[in-house]
Image: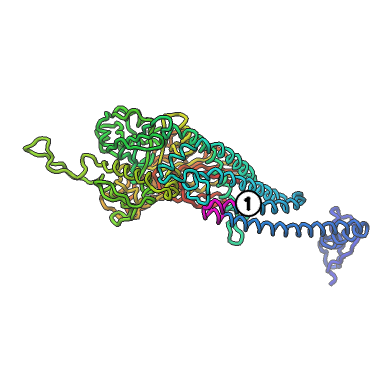
Amino acid sequence: MENIPQIKFGDDTNTSNRYHVKVYESDDAKEEPVLIPKINMQKGSKKSTKKFKFAFKKHPKIILMVLAVLVIFASIVSILSFVVYKKAMAFKASAVSLKESAKSQDLGKIKESLTKTKLSLKELDGSYKLLIPVRIIPFIGSYYSDGQHALIAAKEGLDAGDILIDAIAPYADIIGFSGNENTAGDGFQTAQERIDFVIKSIPQVLPKLDTLSQKVNLIKIEVDNIDPERYPKAYRGIAVRENLVNGISLIDSASELLTDGRPLLENSSYLLGVDSPRSYLVLFQNDKELRPTGGFLTAYSIAKVDKGRFTPVLSDDIYNLDSKYTPTVAAPEPFYKYLKGPYVISRKYKLRDMNWSPDFSESMSLFVKEAEKAGIKKIDGVIAVDTQFLVNLLDVLGTIGVPGYGDFSTKIVSQCNCPQVIYELESFADIEGPIVWSENEPGKIVFAPPNYDNRKKIIGPLMNSILANTMGQPKEKLPALFEAGIKSLNEKHVLFYLFDEKSQDAVETLGIGGTVKEYGGDYLYINDANLGGRKSNLYTTQEVSQVVKIAKDGSVEKELTLTYKNPEKQDGWLNSVLPDWIRIYTPKGSELISVDGLEEKIDPYEDLGKTVFAGFYKLRPQGVAKITVKYKLPFKVKDSYKLLIQKQPGTDSPLHSIKLGKYDQEFTLKGDKEFRLNI
């Protein structure tokens, strides 16, 4: 016990003044000093309590008053918050009722629900303004501001609803709405009559669309001030952040659509031949044999448009047009390396392969110039359609008859596990066999495969029948036909190249010109070309995965994974090995790090203002091909990351996914899509 240090409290010369120890030594040994914390200097609740007690004793009335004010403030805020909550629930109920009315497509019910929702929103806004003092509270204030922006946006949205109803009222039946007693043109019974009416009334629509566009822009300004990243990813099973992102994106898209669609409406009289008739070259692209602008150019037609009425003039096989053409333009290397055929003998472009540029206007500029040498003259532009466009229309029309060729529909048939119209078109065009000439009668054919002299002559009569059926439909079918047309445009199954500069600018602005867009951010356009794989794209699927990594300095690296699958067996006819030339368009200056999965790859190059990674691979029936590309973007990002993905014309809706930090989204690409993510 003698050697145990004894502690004494008091002053000492210890320089730290944190510890005070004196050790008494025994006669036998000397102990090192033991440092023990001063008990009376410990930090903790006691010290805080003492300070509070001291302050309370010194200023009891002031502290009690502050506490009372805080309690009263908290109580008032709680009461007002409850009132706001009740008003918000009432507004939600009104909004749900409005949504249900919209589903009913009854303009009368929509107007009634819109009035009730406006009143409910006004009451909610009034109660919410009473909470304005909470703006000064850190953290909570930003959420209050979000609420203000949302309420202003909702008010403008309901006002926009009134304008929209007024604008569409004369055309309600076209888009499937009822309940409007003053619908113009009620006496019109056919689709053509209603279309004629719409064309004549477009000038009256433009001012209303301008007003609507202004309202939507105001909504956009408000919702763009809301940061979805402030909110949880999910709450009680509801995807909060994703719904906010999708809602903001939808409003942005609506604003762009109204702005971008106006030039096309302004030039509609020119396009539809209102002032004078127009002639268009209609190209049929077989998307089952995918090429850069949507499909192999298989046939063509000349169509006349006079005051909105389309009349086919002639149609023919593209091979017959090629037979009148003398090739002069050098073909790209992949043609004579993989496509071979006529390119083994001559390395000059055939007309049927001139849609090689992924930019439709670039391809058509060359095609039109060269086709003129083969007799295609006096046209005002080019309209390209693919087989999916025919399918979309037939889904609405049902089975139609084509004189001399039978019936056509979209019923799935077992021969190809595809729509019957696709099977018939491919069967008609791809029957092969020898031509046998008579020995005794020169020039006489003894035997030849069906349709050998015009493999695509079915397309003209088929299009005539579809057009006649479409224009002759009762107006009750118009909403579905309208939807089929919009879907075909959005998904790039119909493309336009027009000689009139204003009209061309209009279709490019609206995104139906098939152009490669300029963009101030990250960019991706995957473009595939079937170089002799029969019609294997009928069965091929594509999945695209993007993993984006942003370093602390803002530099961006990406890993792009493309997965192609063909689940069907080889049949030696439609489905066989797919030899594919792939081009990946990225921002100009992108730096390739690595690429795997290509049988041949070439050095990156520049085209259409982009840096391109290109190469060749094969996809076998019941097989999988996987391509992984890693690259670095040519710029750094700071606060936000922007990405534009362009969809290749003629493709279905490939599955895409994007991962950036915690952001992870999967979606089908139905058209060009833009992303703006905060980082």
Q: Is residue 108 magenta?
A: yes
Tell me the residue at 35%/55% (across/down).
567
- 418 is higher (above) or lower (below) than 352: below
Instruction: Look at label 1 and name its amino acid.
Output: Thr
Label 1 crowd (10 A; few <14 / some 14-19 / many >=20):
some
- 126 is higher (above) or lower (below) than 283: below
Colour pattern of the rendering: rainbow
Residue 14 position within the rendered picture, expressed as x and y whole percent measured from the top left: 86, 55
Residue 559 position within the rendered picture, expressed as x and y whole percent measured from the top left: 48, 46
Tell me the residue at 27%/33% (across/down).
322
Q: Main secondary structure of the magenta part?
A: helix
Q: Is residue 650 left or right of residue 518?
A: left
Foreground residue among 171 and 241: 171
Judged from the image, the secondary structure of the residue bearing numbered disc 1 is: helix
Q: Residue 75 sits in which quadrant?
A: bottom right
Foreground residue among 303 and 592: 303
**The N terminus is located in which quarter?**
bottom right
The residue range painted magenta reads: 99-111
Farthest residue to the left: give it: 440
User: Would residue 599 be seen by someone viewing this image from the given angle?
Assistant: no
Q: Which residue is mark 1?
A: 115
User: Would residue 12 be seen by someone viewing this image from the given angle?
Assistant: yes
Q: Is residue 579 left or right of residue 499?
A: left
Foreground residue among 247 and 486: 486
Q: Residue 443 sits in which quadrant?
A: top left
Farthest residue to the bottom: give it: 1
Q: Residue 188 sits in which quadrant?
A: top left
Q: Is residue 148 left or right of residue 309?
A: right
Residue 112 position within the rendered picture, expressed as x and y whole percent measured from the top left: 60, 53
Residue 409 position within the rendered picture, expressed as x and y whole percent measured from the top left: 32, 52
Q: Is residue 74 magenta?
A: no
Tell me the residue at 30%/39% (across/down).
299
